[in-house]
Amino acid sequence: AGMHDECDPCMPVSNYGRSKAAAESLAARYADRVPLSIVRPPVVLGPGDHCGLGLFKTINRHGVHVVAGVHDHLFSVIHVDDLVNAMMLVADNTERVDGGKTGKGIWFAAADETHSWAGLGELAAAALGRNGVRILHVPSALIWAAAGFNTAVGQILRRPLFLNWDKTREATAGEWTCSSQKIRSRLGWSPAIPLSERMRQTVQWYRAQGWLPQRKKDQRKKDRRPTGSPAIPKIQ
């Protein structure tokens, strides 16, 4: 179907997406009184992100990356630092939402390349220092069953679990790609560094915060003392 751009209509498939579309619609009602711009990021990765942590945890622990369904789909991604830079440029720009459906005042921002979910797993594995990752395609029916179970448990616990019906609707809806040609050509924005390096930075931050433990193999290397003769203490 191609990448979405700012003029395409919103077609949310989940409650989360519908809530974001409703917020945009509500804000646009005041566009004639309040200068308004809308930035629509794709999948956001980076420091402080609990949801993105799930992409790395299973790969870090077991070397396995789960892909929903037999067919993989493409995703647009952005690192939070690049997103903040994009938002600052948009805020300084004079183009604002006009309340119409022309895409005016609306901006997409995404990394240079798109990846399948399996491809993102391979990038995450490289950032974690692994030589490779096992891609495990799980039938959609099993994903939906697990999501139904988690949704029920989440209602009992009174807090949503990550894999629920809403997230599964998004994961199985097809491709999630957007074009950032507008913000690149009009505002001169582009990601500061490649996504692969951003992934490594994210892993470093997770580990520094204790969110992502060192692999046992890596820890053994870190703790291993250098070989050679011990230093001879000086005799006073």
Image: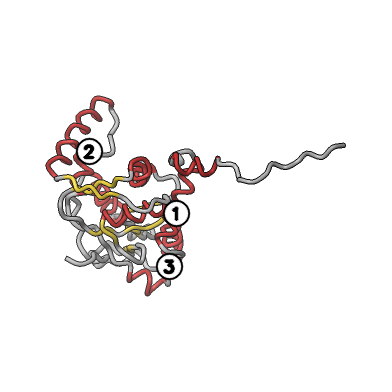
Q: Quadrant of residue 198?
A: bottom left
Quadrant, the N terminus: bottom left
For this orientation, the residue located farthest to the left is 141
**x then y, percent, for residue 179:** 29, 67
Quadrant, the C terminus: top right
Q: Nearer the viewer, residue 193 or 155?
A: 193
Q: Amino acid at mark 2?
A: Asn
Q: Are marks 1 and 3 in contact (CB under 8 Å)?
A: no
Q: Is residue 170 visible?
A: no
> How crowded is the residue under tag 2: few (<14 C-alpha within 10 Å), some, or many (20+)?
many
Kindly state the secondary structure of the residue where label 2 is placed: loop
Q: Amino acid at mark 3?
A: Asn
Q: Give the answer, above or below, for where 162 lies relative to 100.
A: above
Residue 200's label in the rendered image is 1
Q: Which residue is mark 2?
A: 164
Q: Give the answer, above or below, for where 224 lies relative to 83.
A: above
Q: Which residue is mark 3?
A: 93
